[in-house]
Amino acid sequence: SSQVPTPPCSIPIYVGGNSDFAIRRAARSADGWAGVGLPENELEELLSRVRALSAEARDPARKPLEIRTLLKGRADRERLAAHARLGIDALIIQNWQITGKKPGEPQSAQEVGDKLAKLTTFCAQEKAAGA
């Protein structure tokens, strides 16, 4: 059966990979590039390559390649601000990165929610300040 009404756009596709071939493939065919948890200094260098290869391979009629990455380490204000300065469009984070507890250690939904709310408020303030 078909869906009615038809969605106006397809589900976004993100392609990962750090090789030049994988980055070009993402730029040519995908909506975005997905990185894995790299330290900020390595991510900065890789993002330069992603942007340069995207400029070469991406059809200029398409919207710019979106960049998402899995955060490495703890999700704190400094790290989020550093990723924002790098021009990351979205971060993927896990509960333990928000609370600072070890993976698998019990975490209450309330604790995760409270800390996530503070981080998202901080991000919104940073975005408004940079706008």
Image (spheres, helix red, strand yellow):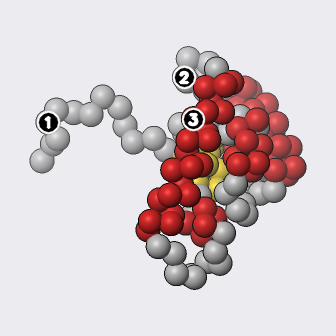
How many C-alpha atoms fall within 10 Å of the one at disc 2: few (<14), some, or many (≥20)? few
Q: Secondary structure at mark 2?
A: loop
Q: Secondary structure at mark 1?
A: loop
Q: Nearer the viewer, mark 3 or mark 1?
A: 3
The residue at 70%/48% (across/down) is 77
Mark closer to the chain start, 2 or 3: 2
Mark 2–mark 3 distance (CA, rounded to whole Å):
27 Å
Q: Nearer the viewer, mark 2 or mark 3?
A: 3
| Percent x, y of residue 75 | 67, 57
The residue at 73%/63% (across/down) is 73
| Percent x, y of residue 124 | 57, 35
The residue labelled by disc 2 is: 62
User: Seen from this angle, which residue lies furthest bottom?
Assistant: 105
User: Seen from this angle, which residue lies furthest top?
Assistant: 61
Mark 3–mark 1 distance (CA, rounded to whole Å):
35 Å
The residue labelled by disc 3 is: 124
How many C-alpha atoms fall within 10 Å of the one at disc 3: few (<14), some, or many (≥20)? few
- Asked whether the residues under the numbered discs 1 and 2 touch, taking CB atoms below 8 Å apart as contact, a structural biologist would say no
| Percent x, y of residue 131 | 64, 20
Q: Note whether 57 is above or below 69 in the view shown.
A: above
Residue closer to the observer: 67 or 84: 84
The quadrant in which residue 122 appears is top right
- Asked whether the residues under the numbered discs 3 and 1 touch, taking CB atoms below 8 Å apart as contact, a structural biologist would say no
The residue labelled by disc 1 is: 4
Residue closer to the observer: 24 or 92: 92
The residue at 85%/51% (across/down) is 42
How many C-alpha atoms fall within 10 Å of the one at disc 1: few (<14), some, or many (≥20)? few
Q: Secondary structure at mark 3?
A: helix
Residue type at numbered disc 2? Arg
Q: Note whether 62 is above or below 36 in the view shown.
A: above
- Asked whether the residues under the numbered discs 2 and 3 touch, taking CB atoms below 8 Å apart as contact, a structural biologist would say no
Residue type at numbered disc 3? Ala
